[in-house]
Image (tube, rainbow, N blue to C red):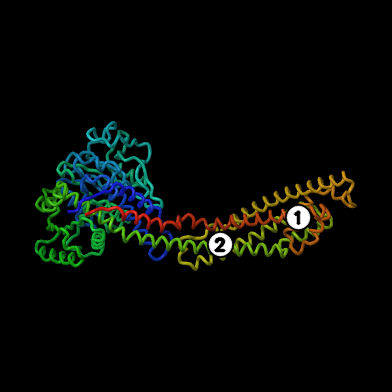
Amino acid sequence: MATLDVQPRLLDVLSALRDRVDAARFPLPLPGAARARRTRSELLDQLDDYVMPRLRSPQAPLLAVIGGSTGAGKSTLVNSLVGRRVSEAGVLRPTTRTPVLVCHPDDRHWFADRRVLPQFTRVRVPVQDGPDAMEAYDGTGPYDETRAYVETHPYDETAPYDETPSYGGAGPYEGGDSRAGGKSASEGGGGASGPAVARGPGGPTGAGSAVGMVRAAGVAPLRIETDPALPSGLALLDAPDIDSLVARNRELAAELICAADVWVLVTTAARYADAVPWHLLRTAKEYDVTLVTVLDRVPHQIASDISARYAALLTRAGLGDVPRFTIPELPESAGGGSGLLPATAVAALRRWLERHAQDTAVRNAAAARTTAGVLASLRSRMPALAGASAAQHAAAVRLADQVEQAYEEAAVRVRREIEQGEVLSGDARAHWRDHELGGRPDELLDALTHGLTSLLRCAVEQADERAADAWRRDPASADAPLAEVAEAAASAARLGVVVRRWRRCLEELAEEGVREARAARGVRTGRGTVRAGERTRAAADPEEAAALLATTLLGGRRARTAGDALADLMGAQAALRLRDRGGRLLETYLQRALDGERERRLAPLESLGVRPDHQAALIAALSLLQKERVTR
């Protein structure tokens, strides 16, 4: 018989593995990426909702999740097992929109907090006044036929929700988890773990409005019911339809099944061969979970034939040893009009569940089998995730290289055109000619600044076009478009800011160079070694020096005379030093401008969270887990 043998380090190792799985990302539309995302989500659900809670609390009640297709009779089965209506059943589909968990009152504390299903916000329906009270409750509106909660005692005095305060109605209920309201990247969570209680003008109005309020807050509700008729040690969870037309219901069903010690799959005589239930059965076999099947609504005349065919299908799928229970087709008014099946119809299933819940050894064996099965499945699932993670990183590197290459070519183009004097053309060339005839240096600087900005803008636009074209040809970039490619005005504005900063630094550099030249002349004057013509240099204008330096640096072959004029203004040695320092300054700002735009284009890839260490981290986490043992 299987037993859980939890080594001291197993929980720590599993927690580390869970964090590695959570960190992995598969956003690029590569082959196998969708499956990797599903596997990641399933693993997180199973680890968070079942494996970790079960290993931490092996003595907790057995949780049997009742799942199946639309209209299979899941809610009716749960109601019949309990002996009263705790989950709404009806002809409208889907009926079960809010998951309902039923347990013995003594077991309530196991499910009131976030030990299991931490991403679900707990909502408890108050005590019902009669068997027909559920008729007014549809899981979304006020639940009228109830005894209202008292504000000072939101649950009751017998088993408080770990001192969690009741919901006061001041705003949306602060609970839940991002994975419950729609999975996000980063699956975080938090919030209160107590029951949601809606308040109206006269006080609390019941759990129905609380459910609606919780849904409005973007989190998933889980309705808690207690009934002494259910044996202690057993909890039933009525899950939404696994084939629901509502996508969120299908997601909820999958998450809830991942939290089960026992999967109870309900199908019907008309739909026992459908693809969706069999996908669930194959998954159960893959994970080696404790599984029960219920063949519901079987006409008496063909009961033997249908049961035999269903058994043959199970045997062919390697599930011949799975316990099977058959429930005959009965009028919906069975049970005195309460919508409950006769006790005899569900007696065999109830006895099986009670035995597994109340016999400690059998209960531990069922939980151990499911836990060990999930952990054993990691041997194949984790390497698959690691391989998908490696493929994601390779694709991300390839896309980044395409952007890097485009901007490297842009940098080469900018330097080449500066050497060829392309900046000193058009308006800038006209101002340079005017300057030689006595024009203002600030106007020449304005023209050169504008020309350099235009050169950078053209180079960036061309780099963006090349990168975008390469990304369009790469299937991995379908969901990762280049950022701000169409925002040419924003890019031009940023480049203009960088160039203006370069100009200010250049002017400061020129002013410093003029001061140094004057100081050097003063030393020579004291020694009596002033040469002819240096009196003119003493009156050198820093703005004039800045204009000549900018022309020398940006004019290329077209600005030879600018270098000669700068030497005449400051002296050959000072001009040479100034040109060297100005060249380094120009290179710094050119690189800064292009790097800034390149980083913006790479930002979408960075935000995807694809990291080079994810593959190694997943394999390392699996390796550590394999050193721990869960004996069966």
In this orientation, does residue 318 appear? yes
Q: Residue at x 20, y 44 (%)?
A: 103
Q: Do the residues labelled 1 and 2 touch (CB within 8 Å)?
A: no
Q: x%, y% of residue 262?
A: 21, 53
Tell how many labels.
Answer: 2
In this orientation, does residue 426 appear? no
Q: x%, y% of residue 605?
A: 49, 58
Q: Nearer the viewer, residue 348 or 74?
A: 348
The quadrant the N terminus occupies is bottom left
Q: Nearer the viewer, residue 561 or 472?
A: 561
Q: What residue type is labelled 2?
A: Glu
The quadrant the C terminus occupies is bottom left
Q: Which of 423 and 511 is in front in this view?
A: 511
Q: What residue type is labelled 1?
A: Leu
In which image quadrant can residue 248 be found? Answer: bottom left
For disc 2, the marked residue is 404
In which image quadrant can residue 217 be found? Answer: top left
For disc 1, the marked residue is 549
In which image quadrant can residue 492 be found? Answer: bottom right
Helix, strand or loop at label 2? It is: helix
Q: Nearer the viewer, residue 93 or 570?
A: 570
Mark 1–mark 2 Cα distance, whole angstroms, equals: 31 Å
- Residue at far top of view: 152
Helix, strand or loop at label 1? It is: helix
* Crowdedness near tag 1: few (<14), some (14–19) or many (≥20) residues, C-alpha within 10 Å: many
Q: x%, y% of residue 169?
A: 35, 37
| Residue 397 marker | none
* Crowdedness near tag 2: few (<14), some (14–19) or many (≥20) residues, C-alpha within 10 Å: some
Mark sitting earlier along the chain (1/2): 2
Q: x%, y% of residue 259?
A: 27, 51
